[in-house]
Image: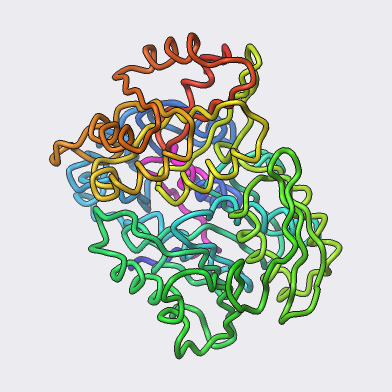
Amino acid sequence: MYQINFDNPQNIHFIGIGGISMSGLAEILIGRGFIVSGSDMKESPLTRHLEQKGVRVFYSQKAENILPETEIVVYTAAVHPDNPEFAEAVRRSLPMLTRAELLGQIMKNYDTPIAVSGTHGKTTTTSMLSHVLLKAESDPTISVGGILPVINGNIRVGSSQTFVTEACEYTNSFLSFFPRISIILNMDADHLDFFKDIDDIRHSFRKFAELLPENGLLVINADTPEYRQITEGLPCRVITYSLKNCADYTASDITYDKYGRPSFHVLKNGRKAGSFCLRVPGEHNVSNALSVIAVADYLGIDTDTIVKGLLDFTGTERRFQLKGEIGGVTVIDDYAHHPTEIEATLRAAHSYPHKKIWCVFQPHTYTRTYALLDEFASALAHADHVVLADIYAAREQNTIGITSEDLQKKILPLGVPCEYFQTFDEIENYLLTSCESGDLLITMGAGDIVTVGEHILGIRS
């Protein structure tokens, strides 16, 4: 693999620079003096931000976008060899790195690289930890998979030796990383277009844990089934946390305010170690916070600072994000696209003021929908009324023949009203005539379903 010399900045081109992670890596390299160019299929706030920093962005993907002065090319898992820019880089024998390989090389430049992994909760937990590190004035470099208001974006370039990032398991990307501290939040059946089954996923997380050096730290959720398969025999230190089982860090006396936001005590090895309040809803966020508390405590951050850092965190974009209110209907948007995430979000919503919970769900990828059809139906049944959009294809073709109507047929026998519409316009019109004052409307999914709520509120991008 080509190794970048960060003391000798070069010309680097990103295929798919508009992605949340790719744009962040590009910004880190800009801060190191690299000359950056890139391409994407459409303009976005992220690409406009990069252009303001001097990046040349092409809104198409053509061979000629690989400029004569280009020295390195970075690409995402979604880019295939038939991509014209990829093919041109191969033709010119240019050094090429995946997004994960570049991120791994960046991590090598820090004494304390922290990687937050898990099937669910990476963005929220990375953001929580970022708030605590900022409150501790540790001046970290941050790469997060969402827009975090406190840093006005998805990237922050600090001057300390602390670097915190998400670590995604898809295509084994996180096996290219070099962490000294890792968090494993959970391991669930997902990305089954790549992994064979849950055992294959656990095997991948075990390999990720084995990346830690002997003086490293693994913080892992002891509520995760078979978690000891990951920790057994590791040379590094292991710290556990749990809501249900014996662990190094646990939560007790969890209570919720009228918006579902929890307060709780933390026990460290059975002894009270502090009282905490969160400004994001749900029991799942207590679990996320425990992992952050464990890491922060290990880093020597005092309890008062951890308390204040967590209290400062009010969420990231598309994570139970309040979008607005119209006609007495509260509109929330959430990125949940796996049954476990959906259930956690809807359980949290039940603690939020509402008459009826409407969930407008856009399934994400054909393979995930097909593999987890019954689980999706069961999770969505926690809403009072479900409205389904067409499946968001993302990187896939529908070779399976699965549709949202198949999901509708699974939901209706569970006693939950469920409609399916082929267009967003139909969904918006239906909601405008069906939702009543006091209802809670949640748009949910990893695609573009957020625009449904925004249009109802009169927000146009």
- Magenta residues? 5-24
Residue 418 on image: x %, y %: 36, 27
**Picture residue at 50% right of the left edge, 79% below the top:** 212
Q: Is residue 153 magenta?
A: no
**Picture residue at 59% right of the left edge, 51% below the top:** 124
Residue 385 on image: x %, y %: 45, 28
Residue 256, can we see it? yes
Residue 449 on image: x %, y %: 43, 27
Residue 362 on image: x %, y %: 37, 32
Residue 37, can we see it? no
**Picture residue at 56% right of the left edge, 46% below the top:** 27
Asked if residue 221 lies left or right of residue 294, the reply is left
**Picture residue at 52% right of the left edge, 64% below the top:** 185
Judge whether 133 appears above or below 62 on screen: below
Q: Is residue 14 magenta?
A: yes
In which quadrant of the rendered view does residue 196 lie? bottom left
Quarter of the figure that contains the N terminus: bottom left
Q: Residue furthest right?
A: 304
Front-lying residue, 46 or 265: 265
Asked if residue 64 lies left or right of residue 124, the reply is left
